[in-house]
Amino acid sequence: MLEVISRSRTAKYLPLITLGCIITVGACSRAEFGEANPWGREISDAKQWFDSEFIHGVLDDGIITESEVHEVRTRIVDCLTYAGIPAQFVSDPLGQITLTINGALTALQHEIQLDCESEWGGPILGLHHQMTVNPNNEDWDTITAACLVRNGLAPSGFTAHDLAEVTAIGSLRIDTRTMSDEEIQAAIDAHDWSIQGFLPNGLPPNDPPALLCSLDPRVEIDRDRFPWVHFEN
């Protein structure tokens, strides 16, 4: 597992993240959006990190609509296309929509990519996903563990603590706010990715059915899609 704490580089490493991306900054109150908004603190934090007028305009009302998500994706692609970088948002087999860029980027093009994402996307896509699948902002490990149990991927009694222990094995935690791109890549390259934890049924937590729970804890897994998996119930 790769856990990234990032200001503007989160999207670059999103495909490597198995249990979500965490943006950690100073504490803020939910007063700006009222106590009724479970994500008020995270939205306030995001506005502190990003000074883009567009991003603030999207986040100011404390909600992120589907039309705003569409506009974010369009603006990022347009920004990259204008700079001569062919890009598109595509859906992967697990239903996750991610930015795909064709071909290797030069150092300058990579900086342009980060600038486009910081100006027109920032935290919006990640926040929208988390607010959609976890509207009450419950503890992520708790609802993911519950999803694994409900779908027969872990036995009854499997807890957030158990899940945290499994995912901690072989994980790499980096804070990209204090690292250069070269340092980030060096840390990833140097890490031993062969070390990993396993769920009680022998399944690694980044195996597709388990990953579905970590991407959307509300999911009801179609067991027929995964005949190799031993389901608990």
Image (spheres, rainbow, N blue to C red):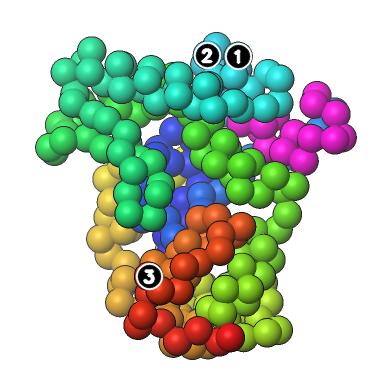
Over which residues does the magenta segment extend?
32-46
Task: Quickly name the residue at label 1.
Answer: 57
Q: Nearer the viewer, residue 10 or 78?
A: 78
Please check the rendered image and state whether residue 73 is part of the magenta-colored stretch, yes or no.
Answer: no
Spot occupied by residue 142 in the image (x, y as percentages of width and height): 69, 66
Quadrant in which the C terminus is drawn: bottom right
- Residue at the far left in the pictured view: 103
Q: Tell me, yes or no, whether the two marked residues, 2 and 1, touch with CB atoms within 8 Å.
A: yes
How packed is label 3: few (under 14 Cα within 10 Å), some, or many (20 or more)? few
Image point 75% across, 47% down: which residue? 136
Of helix, strand and loop, which one carries label 2? helix
Task: Quickly name the residue at label 2.
Answer: 54
Image point 16% across, 35% down: which residue? 102
Q: Tell me, yes or no, whether the two marked residues, 1 and 3, touch with CB atoms within 8 Å.
A: no
Q: Is residue 230 left or right of residue 143?
A: left
Real-space Cα distance between discs 2 and 3? 41 Å
* Res. 47 in view: no
Q: Nearer the viewer, residue 165 or 143?
A: 143
User: Residue 225, labelled with which disc?
Assistant: 3
